[in-house]
Amino acid sequence: MIECNHNPPLIHDYTNLLNQSRDRVDVKRYHEPGLEECELPLVDLSGLLSENDEERASCASEICKASSEWGFFQIFNHGIKVDLLRKMRKEQAKLFKAPFERKTASGLLDNSYRWGNRTATCPKQLSWCEAFHVPLSKICDDTCYGEFNSLREVMQEYASAMQELAKSIARVLVTNMGAQRGAWEDKCNASTCFMRLNRYPPCPVSPEVFGLVPHTDSDFLTILHQDEHVGGLQLMKDSKWVAVKPNPDALVVNIGDLFQAWSNDVYKSVEHKVTVNQEVERHSIAYFLCPSYESFIGCYDEEKSVYKRFTFGEYRSQIQQDVKTFGHKVGLPRFLVST
Ligand SMILES: C=C1C[C@]23C[C@@]1(O)CC[C@H]2[C@@]12CC[C@H](O)[C@@](C)(C(=O)O1)[C@H]2[C@@H]3C(=O)O
Ligand SMILES: O=C(O)CCC(=O)C(=O)O
Ligand SMILES: [Fe+2]
């Protein structure tokens, strides 16, 4: 393969991991024959703004049902302007086209550039992707954009539109649990969330390599703007992997670990992964609704909780420690009361 100078050296890591991995057959186990493509529940979000009580209630009930049965759904009429989505995609493509050395350059988007998996010990722990995992507390800081000036305005506009949208969905989920809204709303604000710009370069080595390894998200909920044309996202449904068909008019929403803990397993943080494509690249943008690191996450009904109370900071450091030790995230099972 001819390496473009904007691609991170994933091929180098893959080859090393393959050579050093004792269990070579493992790579072959990723293959799933006869994979189904699914239609995720599709919610018309304009119902939330309806003046009609019944329409509002029916929209809220669709969101809550999908969050507990699928952990995933798609939304349309979500209020995010098509032009903003287009501008953001354009800036994202421009950023990833920069030479690798410039993306790793000190200070760019708060040093949030990452690729592959530095702690992988075998090919199945490798993610064939590059990403900027950006803390939103930094996006108003002009110095973190370097030469990518035009990204600043679009990124800020995108983050603030997503913040509003994420909160309006979270509000529905919280209200449905009959919990106190106020106490929860204070946890997340415009600077506690994260945005992740993903790029999956074409992967010529093996279709069994992951674009992004199976994982659950570590937030309250995620709003994903996935590539309009190139599919690859798969999620676990009834113990089987199913592929999500790209829908250019919709955004994908998924429940994260914090909502699963807070709702005591009513809403599901479902495992998902991204597959690679041998010929074409794929982009996606994820908005993660996160609280501040000091925020306590505990079930709204503490006595019945299956999880111990933890702060978001504790949760994040446990993940980082597990990724270092085992090469992958463990997540919520670490915080079960019964362990
Ligand atoms: C190597 C890893 C980093 C990651 C946890 C994982 O084991 C697999 C996926 C990664 C991911 C992707 C979505 C979120 O950005 C994230 C915070 C998460 O929950 O899973 C990251 C994890 C990370 O960067 O710590
Ligand atoms: O690229 C995708 O479709 C999914 C990305 C994802 O799961 C993530 O960034 O957490
Ligand atoms: Fe994810």
Image (cartoon, helix red, strand yellow):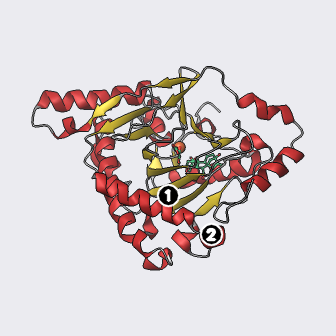
Q: Amino acid at mark 2?
A: Pro
Helix, strand or loop status at disc 2: loop
| Camera sees residue 289 | no
Quarter residue 266 falls in? top left
Within 10 angstroms of label 2, few (less than 14), some, or many (20 or more) residues? some
Residue 112 at x, y = what percent?
57, 64
Closest to the observer: 216 or 39? 39
Mark toward the viewer: 2 or 1: 2
Q: Are marks 2 and 1 in contact (CB under 8 Å)?
A: no
Quote the CA–CA distance across marks 2 and 1.
33 Å
Quarter residue 50 falls in? top left
In the rendered image, which quarter contains the C terminus? Answer: top right
- Sequence-earlier tag: 2 or 1: 2
Q: Residue at x 53, y 20 (%)?
A: 238
Q: Is residue 25 above or below residue 152?
A: above
Taking the image as shown, residue 187 lies to the left or right of residue 282, namely left
Is the residue at mark 1 in contact range of ligand 1, meaning its CB lies under 8 Å from it? Answer: no
Q: Is residue 249 above or below residue 190?
A: above
Q: Residue at x 46, y 57 (%)?
A: 194
Helix, strand or loop status at disc 1: loop
Residue 236 at x, y = what percent?
55, 28
Taking the image as shown, residue 44 lies to the left or right of residue 294, namely left
Q: Residue at x 82, y 50 (%)?
A: 15
Is the residue at mark 2 in contact range of ligand 2, meaning its CB lies under 8 Å from it? Answer: no
Residue 338 at x, y = what percent?
61, 30
Q: Amino acid at mark 1?
A: Tyr
Quarter residue 171 falls in? top left
Residue named by callout 2? 99
Residue named by callout 1? 293
Taking the image as shown, residue 266 lies to the left or right of residue 10, namely left
Within 10 angstroms of label 1, few (less than 14), some, or many (20 or more) residues? some
Residue 168 at x, y = what percent?
28, 45
